[in-house]
Image (cartoon, rainbow, N blue to C red):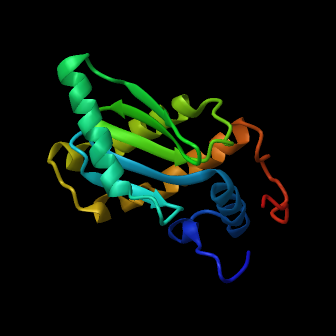
Amino acid sequence: MDNGSVIIFNRFRANIPENQCEIIEKILKKYVLGLVVSRNTGDVLYNIQVDPEIKMELISQFIAALAMFGEENVGHINRIFIGGLNIELSIVQRHNLILTLFFRPNMVKDYLEEEAQRGLDLFYEKFKEPITQKKNNKAIYETFDNDICQIILDYLIKIGVLKEGCDPSLDFS
């Protein structure tokens, strides 16, 4: 990995082998732009920002407003998919939380909803108490790093982009 690149998975390196972090980072930079877990009010609890150009806080507020509009006018919205020229969003809502994944249009979307729901369920179970107590300090939720890293690894294996025990020298650029 070149020294000039931003190391996305610095937070994960304590528990994830170095070679897996490097592989995941290369893949993430190619496909994923970011991930946000927020309350259904739009308050961001946890995020990973791969592309610094994305205004995650602003978009999470928009998604929350869209969900509230749906709730008041058309019923509960479980999932939203938004696509554009250079970005797509997959949004899953459960437990009064919203998980928004920002990704490039060329990303494989097989099993995406299933894994997003799994991630949101795991986040809720792990942080049920602070969530119900309405605690918004992001530091509380940082311990989710290792869980999300494992979910990302599992997803990449499931869609065939990454093989278990693969060679870390593979070029994903």
Task: Let me know if residue 144 appears in the view.
Answer: yes
Name which residue lies at 64% across and 41% down. Answer: 155
Q: Position of residue 59 (x, y in %)?
A: 35, 49
**Total tally of numbered discs in the picture:** 0
Name which residue lies at 51% across and 50% down. Answer: 148
Which is nearer the eye, 167 or 28? 28
**Quarter in which the C terminus is drawn:** bottom right
Which is nearer the eye, 136 or 52? 52
**Quarter in which the N terminus is drawn:** bottom right
Is residue 33 placed above or below 52 in the rendered structure?
above
Q: Position of residue 135 (x, y in %)?
A: 18, 54
Name which residue lies at 24% across and 38% down. Answer: 65
Name which residue lies at 63% across and 56% down. Answer: 28
Is residue 79 placed above or below 128 in the rendered structure?
above
Q: Position of residue 107 (x, y in %)?
A: 66, 42
Task: Let me know if residue 125 appears in the view.
Answer: no
Question: On the rendered structure, is 29 left or right of 73?
Answer: right
Q: Position of residue 151 (x, y in %)?
A: 56, 45
Question: Where on the picture, by quarter, is residue 2?
Answer: bottom right
Question: On the rendered structure, is 107 left or right of 57?
Answer: right
Please identify the residue farthest to the left as the structure is shown.
133
Is residue 160 placed above or below 149 in the rendered structure?
above
